[in-house]
Image (cartoon, rainbow, N blue to C red):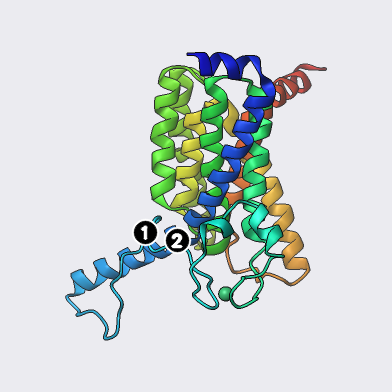
Amino acid sequence: MPVFEYLQETPAAYYTLMGVLGLIIGSFLNVVIHRLPKMLQQNWERECRIILATPAAAGEINETYNLIRPRSRCPHCQRMIRATENIPILSYILLHGRCSGCGKPISIRYPLVEALSGGIALLLAWYFGFTVQAVLALVLSWALLALSIIDLDHQLLPDDITLPLLWTGLLVNLFGVFTDTESSLIGAMAGYGVLWSVFILFRLVTGKEGMGYGDFKLLAALGAWLGWQMLPQIIILASLCGALVGLMLILLRRHAMSRPLPFGPYLAAAGWLALILGRDLNALYVQWAWTP
Ligand SMILES: [Zn+2]
């Protein structure tokens, strides 16, 4: 294919393509982060009503609400956002971070997620080069980014993302893209099993639930993508960072000790680091362990 040859021989074109793709998907991730939890909530409420056989509340609007419809609106004045106002990052700068209808500030999070997504795409393009790994690593990164922010907002890691991520990880490594099939399969089972055991033990000892099932599924997905060999460093890094941040928040009295902190963002970040640095870190650990 001449297009592939061109991209392979012209790094500038390849990087530009990946960067722009990252920005566009970042914009879509903002929609997913904002809407998926609401869609799930709506579904649960609908199912509960069916089970309990209660009629819908008066005045309830039953309009279509999914990742595509309705079009995005300003949360303050409900003004429809035009396509020209929806260009990643650029629109935010041109609009000076304010809605062109009511002048209320637009959350800085939208351009930040877009920039992060674009930056990750560039970094992976550079790290993996023009390979299948680069594209697939991008898919994993986008899922991890969306999961992290949804978990921060709602303390929820939706099955709609974690489970497809798990199956894709197994499928990808059926062809040995990131690790061999055996390591991937063991990784998926061990990832789920380890956190599940910690959860049960913690509950037996303290009577509290310190994690959610979403965390087990996320670590299972990371095990499927990266292989069981990466699980120890992911768990260690995520726990250390989680404990540090949690301690800081409690010391600053920003967080009550009884409320559980979301663990998903730390798992996701540690998993992403393992994707890039995992082999080097493991080699380093082995070196340490073997040095007398
Ligand atoms: Zn507005």
| Three-letter amino acid code at the position of disc 1 | Asn
User: What residue is at 57 percent from the left and 33 percent from the top?
Assistant: 231
- Residue 119 is situated, as x and y percent measured from the top left of the image, at 68, 40
- Residue 14 is situated, as x and y percent measured from the top left of the image, at 62, 25
Q: Which residue does the numbered mark 1 point to in the structure image?
A: 66
SS at badge 2: helix
User: Relative to the observer, which residue lies in front, 8 or 211?
Assistant: 8
As displayed, is residue 290 above or below residue 52? above
| Three-letter amino acid code at the position of disc 2 | Arg
Identify the residue at the far left of this view: 53
As displayed, is residue 75 above or below residue 201? below
Residue 51 occupies quadrant:
bottom left
Please tell me how crowded label 2 is: few (under 14), some (14-19), or many (20+) other residues with Cα within 10 Å. Answer: some
User: What residue is at 59 percent from the left and 16 percent from the top?
Assistant: 6
Is residue 178 visible from the viewing direction of this image?
no
Question: How many labels, in total?
Answer: 2
Question: Between marks 1 and 2, how big is the CA–CA gap?
Answer: 7 Å
Identify the residue at the far right of this view: 292
In the rendered structure, the answer to whether residue 144 lies left or right of residue 243 reads left
Tell me whether the residue at label 1 lies in contact with that at label 2, contact meaning CB atoms closer than 8 angstroms.
yes
User: Relative to the observer, which residue lies in front, 193 or 93?
Assistant: 93
Q: Which residue does the numbered mark 2 point to in the structure image?
A: 35
Q: Tell me the quadrant of ligand 1.
A: bottom right
